Image (spheres, grey):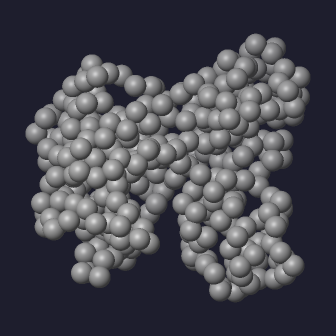
Amino acid sequence: MKILKLGDRGKEVLDVQSRLRSLGYDLGTDGVDGYFGQDMHSAVLTFQQESGLVADGVIAENTWCELVEAGYKAGERLLYLRIPPFRGADVLILQRSLNCLGFNAGPEDGIFGSLTERAVLDFQKNAGLVMDGMVDDSVLRIMAKVTKDGEPHSTEAKIPDRNGGHAGGRSLSGITVAIDPGHGGEDDGFVLASGLREKDLNLDVSLMLAKSLESLGAKIVLTRDSDSPMNLYDRPAVANAAKADIFLSIHHGYYTSSRAQGAAGYYFCRQGYFSEAGSLLAQHIVDRLADELQIPAIPVLGRNFAVLRETQMTAIMIEPVLMTGEGPGGMETAALAQRESESILAGLREYFTT
């Protein structure tokens, strides 16, 4: 898709503006005019913040998909299990309602998968409806009677983790780990003045980590093992196809101030639902990175990134260091990558054995 940013014009901008306005976002006095101005930029930032995305004011693939999905209202379309699955705000509302009524619809990710279908079938059975897995008006009407205005819990409420949870006391031997080196191909990520590209550092760390995990008996799946392009939504698809136990996306952060430093981690979170296992795993790894590299441990954050939402296993994104930061200073790239991979491995081992 074409990436849209401040200053762009055209029918694609008109489309985004129309969707934003239909969702209630303020586009200022100019409104839907086909120009990506400051008012639209502010609206995009607000949408991204409320959706748990990277708030950069740019319409790229992740933001565009979330914007399209946000426009689906409950009852506007017939929902059922299909390939590709239905995605949208209507699916998310359905999952929230089913989970709060005690029917396990799986992670509240807005994706109509097999767990959601099973929950629908269970609900239909209990409600005396035809068990066909189809979510139509008959299902929604009965569901509305047993929930409060179709919203059974507040967005601030903690919803139980429906994605397997944490299983401690295990060995790394025999598990499947999907490692995702961020960026690649024409997408360099952040580039330092020295010429160091984020995509290269991501790959170096990932390859070292993969080698160490393999030596411990783990099965490794890499979304890329060279400087090759990788579609955002293809990355979790690789992990899902491999039926991985853990998904690790490796990136490196950057900040406007060169004094900023720290290790960061992200796990899946959407409204009142979040992955407890992902939060725990990310925290173990961030703590080990901070100890090993002598940098601050930034508190782990819940986000609705595509690679965290689309994966069907415990998934996290790790940013071991800020490329623009002061620490760890003076370290060669290869040595830094090695230290990072060792720290991530230590965090993984800690997660599984405690």
Q: Quadrant of residue 81?
A: top right
Side of 270 where 314 appears, left or right: left
Count of number-bearing discs: 0
Side of 231 where 18 appears, left or right: right
Q: Quadrant of residue 12?
A: bottom right
Identify the residue at horizontal 38%, vertical 40% (top origin). 282
Give the percent coordinates (x, y) of residue 194: 24, 81
> Which part of the image, by quadrant, shows the N terminus?
bottom right
Side of 172 where 269 appears, left or right: right
Q: Can residue 112 be spotted in the picture?
A: no
> Which part of the image, by quadrant, shows the C terminus?
top left
Q: Can residue 271 be spotted in the picture?
A: yes
Residue in the foreground of this view, choosing between 134 and 280: 280
Give the percent coordinates (x, y) of residue 6: 63, 81
Q: Quadrant of residue 329?
A: bottom left
Give the percent coordinates (x, y) of residue 55: 58, 63
Identify the residue at horizontal 60%, vertical 35% (top origin). 273
Identify the residue at horizontal 69%, vertical 48% (top origin). 88
Give the percent coordinates (x, y) of residue 48: 63, 59
Residue in the foreground of this view, choosing between 35 and 83: 35
347 to 335, vertically: above or below: above
29 to 300, vertically: above or below: below
Identify the residue at horizontal 84%, vertical 41% (top origin). 75
Residue in the foreground of this view, choosing between 156 and 261: 261
183 to 157, vertically: above or below: below
343 to 102, vertically: above or below: below
